[in-house]
């Protein structure tokens, strides 16, 4: 596994943390992308969309479309990951 | 001259004397009354003038006192204004606040950058450790 692939799980962990900090409406995909990039990850729009879709498919986030924009909100499972109560392969958290 | 004639003459003289006495009394009364009124008016005028002079004099004194106090206040204001020149004004503080805001923004940006660097260093470190371990 190269570092780019290894980075994916940390990026997903960071996305979950961002969603947890968002309000009840969640965060739009462009907003998530901007914040993920501010944390030093290389993330194009497709990468963020794939990450959000992965998190949604595994029940850690909920996606909905408003107009043409994807909005994501964190689920209880996602919150458990962020709080450290749940460990799942494919998502990893780093120390803040 | 008989008694009747003498009595008539006395009556006439008495009447004329009475008329003359009355006229003189009236004339004296009129003259004294006029003089008395003039004197009273002049006395009143003098009193009014005296009172007016007194009030004007008091007003002048008060005005002079006020002028003196006003001059003192003006001096005080001038001193305060002169001292105020060396104090910081709202405009000066505005510039300082703007600079502080810019510094705060820079600090915030630097903090975010260092957090991002820390995160990426952790990613690299864990990747290397995993590689060495595996």
Image (cartoon, coloured by chain):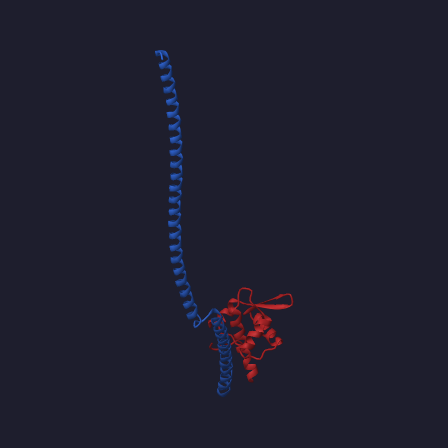
Chain colours: A red, B blue
Query: Quarter holding the N terminus of chain B?
Result: top left
Q: Nearer the viewer, residue B5 or B96?
A: B5
Where does the image place residue A64, in percent across and percent down from the top left?
A: 60, 66
Query: Is B31 drawn above or below residue B1 in the view shown?
Result: below
Q: Nearer the viewer, residue B38 or B109?
A: B38
Extreme residue in the right direction: A68
Residue in the foreground of this view, choosing between B33 and B76:
B33
Q: Residue at x 40, y 35 (%)?
A: B34
Q: How many marks?
A: 0
| Residue located at (40% from left, 30% from top) | B27
Where residue A43 sits, quadrant-wise, is: bottom right
Is B120 positioned to the left or the right of B70 in the image?
right
Tell me if residue B53 comes above or below residue A14 in the rendering.
above
Q: Position of residue A73 (x, y in %)?
A: 55, 67
**What is the x, y in percent for residue A69?**
63, 68
Residue B15: give x, y in percent of width and height: 38, 20
The residue at the far front in this view is B1
Q: Nearer the viewer, residue B89 or A73?
A: B89
Tell me the residue at 37%/22% (across/down): B17
């Amino acid at each position: 596994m190269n570092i780019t692939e290894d980075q994916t799980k940390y990026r997903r962990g960071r996305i979950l943390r961002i969603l947890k900090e968002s309000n009840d409406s969640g965060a739009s995909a462009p907003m998530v992308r901007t914040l993920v990039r501010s944390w030093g990850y290389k993330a194009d729009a497709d990468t963020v969309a794939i990450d959000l879709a992965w998190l949604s498919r595994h029940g850690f986030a909920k996606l909905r479309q408003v107009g043409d924009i994807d909005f994501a909100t964190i689920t209880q499972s996602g919150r458990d990951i962020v709080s450290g109560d749940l460990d799942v392969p494919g998502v990893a958290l780093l120390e803040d | 001259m008989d008694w009747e004639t003498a009595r008539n003459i006395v009556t006439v003289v008495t009447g004329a004397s009475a008329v003359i006495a009355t006229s003189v009394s009236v004339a004296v009364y009129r003259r004294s009354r006029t003089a008395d009124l003039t004197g009273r008016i002049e006395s009143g005028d003098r009193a009014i003038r005296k009172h007016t002079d007194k009030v004007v004099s008091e007003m002048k004194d008060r005005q002079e006192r006020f002028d003196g106090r006003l001059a003192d206040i003006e001096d005080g204001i001038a001193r305060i204004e002169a001292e105020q020149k060396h104090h910081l004004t709202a405009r000066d503080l505005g510039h300082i606040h703007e600079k502080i805001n810019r510094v705060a923004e820079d600090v915030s940006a630097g903090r975010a950058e260092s957090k991002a660097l820390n995160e990426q260093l952790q990613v690299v470190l864990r990747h290397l450790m995993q590689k060495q371990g595996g």
